[in-house]
């Protein structure tokens, strides 16, 4: 330590940079890291599906982490609201954190409405081709509204929530997602299997 | 999925919440998660030490991640500068991300000057007692300045960098850190061993 900044020919073993690389972590974990990016309307099943996929991955020994409103909106993004500007910043931060988890060798699953195509594509551009797996949870808004698991559609219809995606704020569906799941019709475990097939096909597992 | 919001007596197996808990991750990893928070002046050896500890932890099979200026300042906190206000926000975000990594079962090591006591204590308060391990890299400023590994002290003295910790901005040493390392005198590997002793003593490993 005393010689930290001394010449390279110092006999001391000194690390200045990360020696534990993503590749070494992946070797230890025996799977590759990836971002599974779930997008869709409120109530489309993003979070439920992300957690079900995570449970499956855990059981086969994978390192995983789910980023969703529950653990991000109250913490890291607790200073942000739901204006268009704040939504952009929210997704930017989620993308940056997802990238860190990917560097850590983890299969990270994100479950945010993430309504704007440009923001999702920015995250895609932050990582290497094949590492960002966009999964569109496609569900008609009337089905989402009938479920209304969080009571948010009711509040939005009553005007208690403004800028609500699908009602008073736009949702832009993905142009070319890696996977489209019709979450109004499909069984949860069938959805999980579809996601697993994508991970197997792209060599993550 | 179609029955996601149906009654609890539905025969479908539906997860709404995280089933892969921190405890299950820790069981899989065979170690507990923790935050190793390195603090000290620029050039005190925080990053070098964090990476050396990480290398050691990797070799004994631990899941780790280092958060430092290299992977945070250009990404997640790329919108922040070095004003007092931005430093506070920087450390807040780093704390929130460290907490997420801890939930993910990882030993997370942070290497930021983090000059303000109050900000570090806020992160400490975010987690359970014993999970936040504050490591003060104590090094006289003249030693840091002589090393000047990044050439920052020179720029600060010439007025090219304002609000530079130790010169034009305050550094508040920890009041009761879990570990103090005299990085001007100690050997790097001795420092690593001291950190390992703390992790062993508090039951993380």
Image (cartoon, coloured by chain):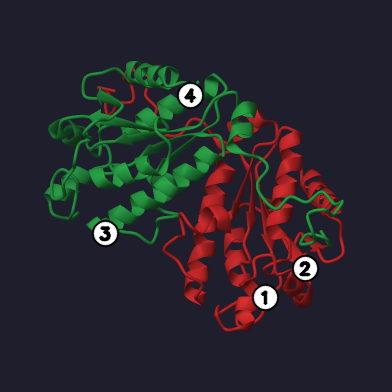
Chain colours: A green, B red
- Residues at marks 1 and 4, CA–CA distance in whole angstroms: 45 Å
x then y, percent, for residue B170: 63, 79
**Label annotation for residue B172:** 1
Task: Please state, as top left, top right, bottom left or bottom right, where the N terminus of chain B lies in the image.
Answer: top left
The answer to whether B119 is drawn above or below residue B59 in the figure is below
Residue B117: quarter of image: bottom right
Tags 3 and 2 on a common chain: no
Q: Which residue is mark 2?
A: B138
Q: Mark 3 = which residue?
A: A85
Cα separation between marks 2 and 4: 43 Å
Q: Pointers 2 and 4 in contact (CB under 8 A)?
A: no
Looking at the rendered structure, the number of numbered marks drawn on it comes to 4
Q: Residues within 10 Å of mark 4 (few under 14, many from 20)?
A: some
Judged left or right of residue B76, residue B187 is right
User: In the drawing, does residue A163 fall left or right of residue A54?
Assistant: left
Residue at mark 3 to residue at mark 2: CA–CA distance: 42 Å
Residue pictured at 28% horizontal, 44% vertical: A114
The residue labelled by disc 4 is A204
Q: Secondary structure at mark 2?
A: strand
Q: Do the residues at discs 2 and 1 belong to one chain?
A: yes
Q: Is residue A39 left or right of residue B146?
A: left
Q: Earlier in the sequence, mark 2 or mark 1?
A: 2
**Between tags 4 and 3, which lies in front?**
4
Q: Secondary structure at mark 4?
A: loop
Nearer-the-camera pick, A194 or B161: B161
Q: Position of residue B185 (x, y in %)?
A: 87, 65
């Amino acid at each position: 330590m005393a010689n930290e900044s001394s010449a390279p020919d110092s006999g001391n073993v000194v690390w200045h940079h990360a020696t534990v690389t993503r590749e070494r972590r992946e070797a230890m974990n025996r799977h590759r890291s990836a971002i599974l990016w779930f997008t869709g309307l409120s109530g489309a099943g993003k979070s439920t599906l992300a957690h079900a996929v995570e449970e499956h991955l855990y059981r086969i020994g994978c390192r995983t982490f789910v980023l969703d409103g529950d653990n991000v909106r109250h913490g890291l993004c607790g200073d942000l609201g739901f204006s268009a500007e704040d939504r952009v910043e929210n997704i930017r931060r989620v993308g940056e954190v997802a990238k860190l988890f990917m560097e850590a060798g983890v299969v990270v699953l994100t479950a945010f409405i993430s309504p704007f195509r440009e923001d999702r594509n920015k995250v895609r551009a932050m990582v290497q081709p094949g590492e960002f797996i966009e999964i569109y949870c496609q569900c008609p808004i009337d089905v989402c509204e009938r479920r209304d698991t969080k009571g948010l559609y009711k509040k939005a219809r009553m005007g208690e929530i403004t800028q609500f995606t699908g009602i008073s704020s736009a949702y832009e569906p993905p142009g070319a997602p890696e996977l489209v799941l019709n979450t109004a019709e499909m069984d949860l475990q069938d959805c999980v299997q579809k996601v697993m097939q994508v991970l197997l096909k792209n060599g993550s597992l």
